[in-house]
Image (cartoon, rainbow, N blue to C red):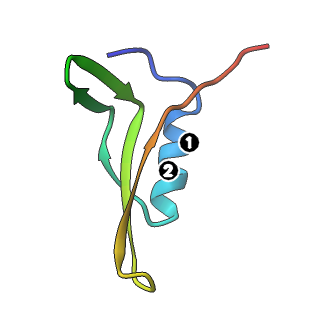
Amino acid sequence: MSRRDNLHFSLRRTLEKDGWTITDDPLVLVLEHTLLKADLGAEKFFNAEKEWHKIAVEIKDIDW
């Protein structure tokens, strides 16, 4: 697994406080012969819309 950026846990906590459920940490997707990785996978149920929303998050911290 690659090194987590400094913002990883802060962003994860922020998503969880906003009602998102972290489903994968990291999120790994396989498409045909390609392996894709994102830092987080999350989902949230919106009652008003009655549907699930899912996101994949890639976190980058740039040291200047």
Mark 2 lies on residue: 13
Q: Amino acid at mark 1?
A: Ser
Circle 1 sits on which residue? 10
Number of callouts:
2
Image quadrant occupied by the C terminus: top right
Residue depicted at x 27% and y 18%: 34
| Marks 2 and 1 in Cβ contact (< 8 Å) | yes
The residue tagged with tag 1: helix, strand or loop? helix
Relative height, residue 37 to residue 46 (above, below): above
Vertical arrangement, residue 35 with respect to residue 12, above or below: above
- Which residue is at the front of the view, 1 or 31? 31
For the residue labelled by badge 2, is the local secondary structure a helix, a strand or a loop? helix
Taking the view exactly as shown, the residue that stands out farthest to the bottom is 48
User: Horizontally, is 35 left or right of 44 in the view?
Assistant: left
x then y, percent, for residue 21 = 35, 58
| Residue in front for this viewpoint, 50 or 19 | 50
Q: Looking at the image, which residue is at 45% across and 86% down?
A: 48
Rounded to the nearest whole Å, what is the CA distance between mark 2 and mark 1? 5 Å
Residue located 35% across and 74% down the image: 51
